[in-house]
Amino acid sequence: MPPTTRRAAAAARLHQQPPAAPSTAPPPAWRKVLYEQPAGLADNYTDATFLQHLVVNAKVPQRHYWSVVQDAVAVVQQINVVAAVVVAAVQLHEVCICTLWATAQHPVVTELLCGCYALNTPCTPPPPPPPPPKSQGTLPPPLLLLLNGLVLTTLAAAYIATGQRLPGGSLARAVRQVVLLTTGVYLLSPTYGTLSRTISTDTIIALATLLFMLHLLFYDYNYPAAYVVVAGTRHTTSPPSHMSPSHPPSPSQHHNHNTSNNVERPVSLGAAIFASVLLASRLQSDMRVFAHLTYSLTLFLLSPYLLRTIRRLSFNLHVAVTILLFSLVIIMVQRVSWVGMVVHGVLCAFVCFAAPAWLIRIHKYKAKINGPWDEAVPRMRVG
């Protein structure tokens, strides 16, 4: 028989054989062990018990309205600090805020602000062709310098009275740093005053607004509070309201919080200082530029130390300082525009009282899912 005939006969016999019976051996058992793949199972295989370990809202803390309101006071404080810097720049620049908007060619806003101007003197925007005349302003620069000294003295007195370490390390070193910083700002004031001479006013206003919003967004509001209200009781040296006492933060959460603060704090401070420099560059004398920059540096760089110290000492004093700051800013804004005063008051009331209620209302829709797919969190004993 030829070879081709023999191969054809063997292939025919192979096709005529009955199919093999399916294997009745049980599949290999799957175990939840890292880096172990049983034979015959895919890399992403899971058994029927995989979703039995799913947990919804296991570590979501229960928020209480008044504890969230207490935390919102810090936000109100910083909004007032930003408003104080902006209003001081406006009062240093012109007698009326509508002149700023007139130079920026916003007729509708100009008419609205001029109609609501608080002073009895009439305020008429200048015609577009000639530049706006220089004015003496409604806020003298020496008053801002006096306020800077008052804030610095209060800060030093608070640290010394409480026995805490000054931000500079010692009183002599802190005074030396303040003198060096003030001298540097004074020498650079002529440069800052001409920094945005070739840029239009509306661009400066828009950019400063965005920078202040960035500052408020990235500001560290997690003050080291000496109190927290949980279920109607007040405890000392407790975590803030977003952290449940029954679920202390893990080491990874501490690491993530510190890492985010290392990024957010410089961004917030840099945005505030840049916006202050932009506002100061529109002022009409070197002394006004110097007064406004030192005033801004005092509020953005040093006032957080004072506010945190006050909150650490007493909650009642913390609220009293917030009310005092809000009242002073309202008076300053009222001297510029009634519309601004109303908007500022409504904004602070919304942030302090309405926003916490809104947060509590939508918090019940939160769904945080945990399960076997979560990343492993190392449990390390610190200290």
Image (cartoon, grey):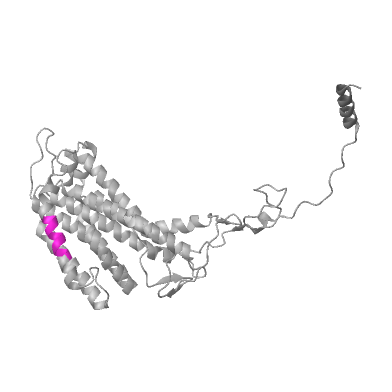
Q: Quarter of the image containing the C terminus?
A: bottom left
Identify which residue is drawn at 24% across, 73% down: 158
Identify which residue is drawn at 15% across, 44% down: 195
When asked about the image quadrant of residue 300, the answer is bottom left
Q: Main secondary structure of the magenta part?
A: helix
Residue 20 visible in rendering: yes
Whole-percent x, y for residue 274 in the image: 23, 50
When asked about the image quadrant of residue 156, the answer is bottom left
* Left or right: 122, with 311 as reference point: left
Q: Quarter of the image containing the N terminus?
A: top right
Queried whether the magenta region covers residue 54, the answer comes back as no
Queried whether the magenta region covers residue 184, the answer comes back as yes
Residue 138 visible in rendering: no
Residue in the foreground of this view, choosing between 213 and 137: 213
Identify which residue is drawn at 39% across, 72% down: 227
- Vertical placement of 134 versus 248: above or below? above
**Magenta region:** 177-186
